[in-house]
Amino acid sequence: MGAAGQGLSTEEVQSIREALAAGRKPKVVFTASAGQIAGQTGQVVELTDPAVSDEFVVVRFGRDELPFSPADVAVAPRGAGRKAAEPEPDPEPQVEVASAEPEFVLDRPRVPAPREESKVETADVKPAAAPARKAVKAVKAKGPAGLTVTLSYADGEWTVAAQQGSKSLAKPYVVKPAEALRMVALVDVPGVHEAVEQIMAAERAEAEQQAEKLRAELAEIEARLAELREAH
């Protein structure tokens, strides 16, 4: 049981991948992190892409094929498959007991009908255990939706927006260039810094041109005002 609590190592995952490629279905035992089915055994039928989900080890357990993370399973020790097969013969003794009951029916003709009904009821109770296995996997809660914060530049303005999944947390609102520059400084990507510096340089050049134009217009207005004052 000590090895069962450690989960699969990187080397064991690679060994299972090679076994699957060879057409084999390696046996594994569920660890304590798998929940109620800890100690049970199953067969690995597929390894999906670990970049898509941490639960990329697809295990056949009974009639179900469910995804688990490497921490949920461990390589099954030899002989574990035999122990896993022992619980299945349980229904067979019950069938034998049921077949033994009709022997008493020969002495009491009216007793068989109610006893057959009770057999049907006990048979109905057995399948109720099957959904419990599926409920084990349903206990795991999904993580929160992804959060996206977007800094944008358009028409001479910097805006920030935030969205979680499909829900908008903050509509785009205007921020000062200095604040935008501080946000970009947190991103250690040279291409982003260069793009922002080019935008800032273009804005400064445009602002300087407008300032020069306004100074020239102001100088003309002041000269005109001086002439009007001299006229008085």
Image (cartoon, rainbow, N blue to C red):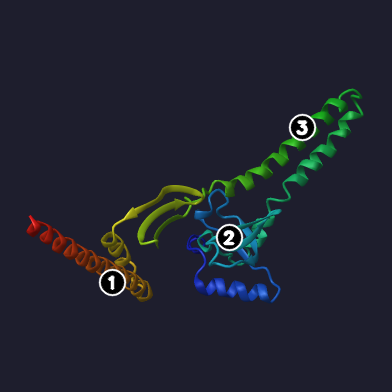
> Image point 86% across, 24% down: which residue?
111
Along the line of sight, which residue is nearer the eye, 23 or 89?
23
Three-letter amino acid code at the position of disc 2: Val
Relative to 204, is 168 above or below?
Answer: above
- Asked which secondary structure carries label 3, the reply is helix
Mark 1 or mark 3: whose residue is earlier in sequence? 3
Q: Residues within 10 Å of mark 1 (few under 14, many from 20)?
A: few
Along the line of sight, which residue is nearer the eye, 49 or 86?
49
Q: Is residue 92 left or right of residue 69?
A: right
Where on the picture, by quarter, is residue 219?
A: bottom left
Q: Quadrant of the C terminus?
A: bottom left
Three-letter amino acid code at the position of disc 3: Glu
Mark 2 or mark 3: whose residue is earlier in sequence? 2
| Residue of label 3 | 121
Q: Is residue 59 left or right of residue 105?
A: left
| Residue of label 2 | 29
> Image point 42% across, 47% down: which residue?
169
- Asked which secondary structure carries label 1, the reply is helix
Mark 2 or mark 1: whose residue is earlier in sequence? 2
Q: Give the percent coordinates (x, y) of residue 136.
A: 58, 47
Q: Give the percent coordinates (x, y) of residue 21.
A: 67, 75
Q: Residues within 10 Å of mark 3 (few under 14, many from 20)?
A: few
Q: Is residue 101 left or right of residue 232?
A: right
Separation of marks 2 and 1 at Cα, in angstroms: 68 Å
| Residue of label 1 | 205
